[in-house]
Amino acid sequence: MSKWEKVKLGSVGQFKSGGTPSRSKNEYFEGNIPWITTVALKKTYIDENDAMAFISAEAIENSATKIIAANSIMVGTRVGIGKVSINKVPMCTSQDIISIENIDEKQLDKQYLVHCIKSYNCFFDTQKRGATIQGISSDVLKSIDIPIPPLKIQREIANTLDTATSVLVMRKQQLADLDKLTQSIFYNMFGDPVINENRWDTGIIKDLAEKIQYGTSEKASVDKLTYPIVRMNNITYQGNMDFSDMKFIDLSESDKKKYLVYKGDLLFNRTNSKELVGKTAVYRQETPMAFAGYLIRLVPNEKANSEFISAYLNSSYGKKLLFKMAKNIVGMANINAQELSNIKIYIPPIALQNQFATIVTKIEEQKALVKQAIDETRYLFDSLMSEYFE
DNA sequence: CCTGATGCATGCAAGTTTGG
DNA sequence: CCAAACTTGCATGCATCAGG
């Protein structure tokens, strides 16, 4: 699309930076002017509902922040580099956002411009500077080229990319719905853990376990050694596993027995911040991996299926229970193996648990399909971006 | 071997200085 | 004088260690 005339972003409007009023003055944050940080820049259009705080006129007088007129382009330049939104109402921003006011709508469609700026994210990534917190300078932002096709074509491009984006959002929603489905099937099959209306036998987690053991405290390495090692960040709060960031470890013959986790085992995060202690997930991979010392591995006995225990601990009841149990020491919280073993649980017949596990497996298959669709949509989106802007 | 403590890295926000 | 750059300090999450 290089056939179109290009202008520098710096020339399309007036650039303004933001600021953060001092937090030590409470009265600065008792006003009615919306104020945002880059966290709010997560969708194309934002308004007062996305405000992180409401500040007073006095705060504007006494800090670097300033009012940005409605319908300006807001770009994240430090934390959250390259996030772009349009503000529907006048608002103020932190110093990590640069805003562009007074864009000529007869020349440039704003939604088009949002996508166009976003297409420079890889470039921004190469331009960021700073030791601990990286950011790009306003000069970098002003320097990027904006192709200017006729307005009609700009709108077409924006619409196509918006559609792709909304498909992506929809698919992500599907994924979230599938997660909820597991929980609601759990409730339907087994009933409320508090009431136990089905009068299942009750017991403690220990009754359902053949083995409960800690993982290795061996230092993990980024080099590709024999075994990938599951660490606490590989278990999500929702009760799934995420293997996108792995480290590796070697295991001696004797350690393999102790420190390998197999398909169908349950993993439990015993140490973390208070909110995250007790993250639980079923290990569903065919090939075994090692697991770290702040995780506990539970091998179910003939009375239980891990999928059932996991869904129990991941239910809102289970989450509350674990949160209450976690012992808070300086910064970190703990639930040790003993305490995990003694958690009360109802024990439905194993046949029913297995039936539940089968359904969970089906749902997981669906999730895998949706994830694949998400990857494909993302690929489509990226190729559209490069077609339009490169 | 089990467990809690501790140290380290990173993220985040605000204060302070610099330079056009 | 203002915006940008640099500096500092605190919070959180993560990883490892050492004593019982």
Image: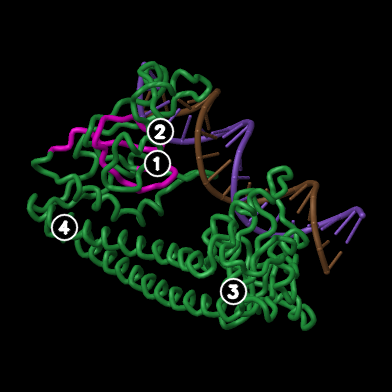
Chain colours: A green, B brown, C purple
Which x, y percent locates residue A81? 39, 47
Q: Mark 1 lies on which chain?
A: A
Disc marking residue A390: none
Answer yes or no: do the residues labelled 2 and 3 have beta carbons within 8 Å? no
Q: Which chain carries label 2?
A: A
Q: Nearer the viewer, mark 2 or mark 3?
A: 3
Q: Name the residue under label 2.
A: A94
Residue closer to the observer: A211 or A343: A343
Q: Earlier in the sequence, mark 1 or mark 2?
A: 1
Asked which quadrant contains residue A253, the reply is: bottom right
Question: Regarding mark 2 in the picture, which secondary structure is present there?
Answer: loop
In the rendered view, tell whether residue A117 sits above or below residue A68: below
- What amino acid type should be assigned to the residue bearing mark 3? Tyr
Q: Mark 1 points at which residue?
A: A38
Q: Dot 2: few (<14), some (14–19), or many (≥20) neighbours within 10 Å?
A: some
- What amino acid type should be assigned to the residue bearing mark 1? Thr
